[in-house]
Amino acid sequence: MELLLPFLRDIALAFVVAVGFAILFQTPRRVLWVAGVLGGLGHCLRFAMVSQGFGPIPSTLAAAVAIGLAGIFASHRVHTPPVVFTMPACITMIPGLFAYRAMLGCIRITDLEMAKQDPHLVAQTAHYFVLTASLLFTLAIGICSGALLFRKRSTKSLFRRIF
C-alpha cells in the first residue's frame, strides 16, 4: 500500500487539474470525466517512468502518446472530438518549472555582475530552455500521434473488434 500511495495521489491531483482545465476550455460536462481520467492516467504513466529512471523527455512522450491514442478510442465512445479532452489531459504535463528556471536564467544573464559570479549560468539557462522546448514538442507530437495514425482508417472497426 505504501508503494501505491504516491501513484494514487498523482492520479488524483492530475485528475483534478485536467478537469479544471477542461472546465476552463468549456468542455461539455458529460465528457469532463474523460479529460480527468486521461490526465490522471497519462501523468501517472509519466510519473512511473520517471521513477524508474527514464528521462523526462521519453516519459512525457510516452504519456502524451498514450493520452493521444486513448483519446481517439474515447472519442468514439462518447461521440466527441478527441481534442476536447486530450488537450486538458496533456496540460497536466506542461513543464512549468523548467520554463520558470529558463526565464529566471534569462533575467539573471542581463545583470552583468550576476553573470560574472556564476560562470555556469548561461549553460544552465540554455539547458532549461532546450528541455522546456523539447517537452513541449513531445506533448504536441503525443497528442497528434493518434490522429496521425488513424487518419486514413477509422478506429471504429478496430474498436468493435477489441470490445
Image: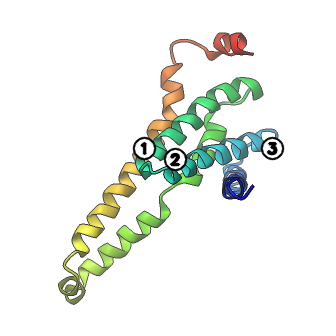
Q: Is 60 drawn above or below residue 13 in the view shown?
A: above
46, 128: nearer the viewer = 46
Gap between marks 2 and 1 measured at Cα: 9 Å
Q: Residue at position x 62%, y 48% from top? A: 44
Q: Is 136 drawn above or below residue 123 in the view shown?
A: above
Sequence-first tag of 3 and 1? 3
* Residue 141 coordinates in the image, percent (x, y): 44, 37
Residue 49's label in the rendered image is 2
Of badges 3 and 2, nearer the viewer stands 2
Q: Residue at position x 76%, y 29% from top? A: 78
The residue tagged with tag 2: helix, strand or loop? helix
Query: Residue most toward the right?
Result: 30
Residue topped by disc 1: 58
Q: Quick check: marks 3 and 2 in contact, CB under 8 Å?
A: no
Residue 29's label in the rendered image is 3
State left or right for residue 123 relative to residue 5.
Answer: left
Sequence-first tag of 3 and 2? 3
Residue 132: quadrant of the picture: bottom left
